[in-house]
Image (cartoon, grey):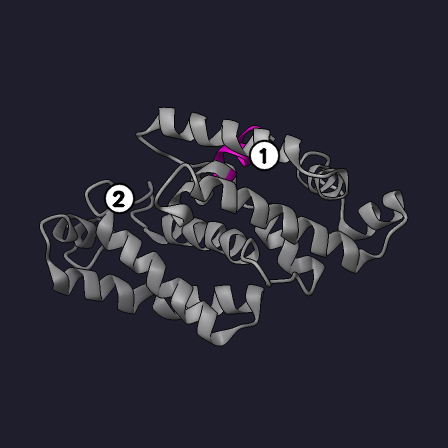
Amino acid sequence: MNPSSDTSLIASIKVDNHLAYTALVDKYWADLYRHIWQKIKNADEAKDIVQDIFLGLWKNRAKIRTDERDSLAPYLFRAAKYAIINYFSRPGITISNENALSAALNSPSGIRTDDSLLLKELEQIVELEVSSLPERLQVPYRLSREQELTIKEIALSLSVSEQTVKNNISSALHKIRFKLGQHNSDVTIGFILAVAAFLHHK
């Protein structure tokens, strides 16, 4: 096996090899940063997100696997998309353009986890919280998630501005994230899992 392949590096990381970890960071850092920056347009936040992704990689190294092509890229970029969702759920963060919102909401549905009970519980919390949202937040959120309407289509349907739709979906994401924080000490991981589960059943 090629010692510089992702599979070999992951195997080394699982036995706490910091050099292998550094090699993976060096290999993917620039591409991840560029991808995230293009979505959120904030250089400092993009750097922080990339750092968090790699910290999560180290923390969960025992469970990480490469894909059938011996690549860690799908795992890392899936984590990046869920991190973008998490970013837009923060208080005070507004979605400036439809492409950014689409990138957040239309993340890939596939996700692997060994904790199916936690995943199911978080999914139920998300649905309960969505159902309890005020109509002005719940309706655009569901139209975007469940019917896959664009911001423009939602705005026309509801007779409101496109910016209002963006702001309401941002508010909905924030409220869901806050609720998950009451059920899970690791808000970021909990929110990512729950959104992934919700998307899985689209």
- 3D distance between C-alphas at marks 1 and 2: 30 Å
Q: Is residue 130 left or right of residue 188?
A: right
Residue 10, image x, y percentages: 20, 50
Magenta residues, dominant SS class = helix
Asked which secondary structure carries label 1, the reply is: helix
Query: Which residue lies at the image location 63% right of the left edge and 59% below the top edge?
Result: 100
Which residue position holds label 1? 129
Q: From this view, report whether residue 95 is shown above or below residue 118.
A: below
Which residue position holds label 2? 64
Asked which secondary structure carries label 2, the reply is: loop
Residue type (three-letter) at the residue carrying disc 2? Ile
Q: Is residue 106 visible?
A: no
Seen from the viewer's position, the closer of residues 98 and 45 is 45
Q: Is residue 113 left or right of residue 59?
A: right
Q: Is residue 55 magenta?
A: no
Seen from the viewer's position, the closer of residues 10 and 71 is 10
| Quadrant of the drawing holding the C terminus | top right
Query: Which residue lies at the image location 64% right of the left edge and 55% below the top edge?
Result: 101
Q: Is residue 12 left or right of residue 84?
A: left
Q: Is residue 104 visible?
A: yes
Magenta region, residue range: 195-201
Numbered circle sitting on residue 90: none
Query: Which residue lies at the image location 22% right of the left edge and 55% below the top edge?
Result: 5
Residue sticking out furthest to the front: 182
Q: From this view, report whether residue 141 is shown above or below residue 59.
A: above
Residue type (three-letter) at the residue carrying disc 1? Glu
Mark 2 surroundings within 10 Å by alpha-carbon count, few (fewer than 14), some (14 through 19), many (20 or more):
some
